[in-house]
Amino acid sequence: VQLVESGGGLVQPGGSLRLSCAASGSFLRINTMGWYRQAPGKGRELVANIISGGSTNYADSVKGRFTISRGNAENMVYLQMNSLKPEDTAVYYCNADLTVGPFLHEMNYWGKGTLVTVSP
């Protein structure tokens, strides 16, 4: 299984970016997909996730500014980031909890990350 992120880059404060993540490989079901971020010198934190039934969770710091969504192809997840602030600068990682294999194990996977830099 692979998770591949795209869409990071440099943006000015107040700007917008859209991150995409595609899950590929052999799995039976996507239970949860989401985004974490890690700023320089800090630990990794949950930004937002979406559960298979469609419910979502957001970090307080991004509520009202970021929106997580699934694509028409269920292996895709997006993070629309608006009103970006310098403190949003971080490496953003896609994360997925998947059901895999003949014995229906739940496994957790990470992408390699995409850098988002918010700076004038």
Image: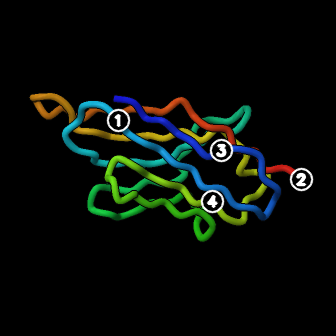
**Which of the two labelled residues, at mark 3 and mark 2, occupies the earlier sequence position?**
3
Residue underneath mark 2: 120
In this view, the residue farthest toward the left is 102
Quadrant where the N terminus is found in the figure: top left
Q: Amino acid at mark 4?
A: Met
- Determine the secondary structure under disc 4: strand
Image point (58%, 62%), residue name: 66
Count up the numbered dots. Answer: 4
Mark linked to residue 24: 1
Which residue type does callout 2 highlight? Pro
Label 3 crowd bin: few (<14), some (14–19), many (20+), radius 10 Å: some
Disc 1 residue crowd, few under 14, some 14–19, many 20+, Cα 10 Å = few
Residue at image position (34%, 47%) is 75
Question: Which of the marked residues, 1 or 4, is nearer the chain's N terminus?
Answer: 1
Question: Which residue is identified by label 4?
Answer: 81
Nearest-to-viewer mark from 2 and 1: 1
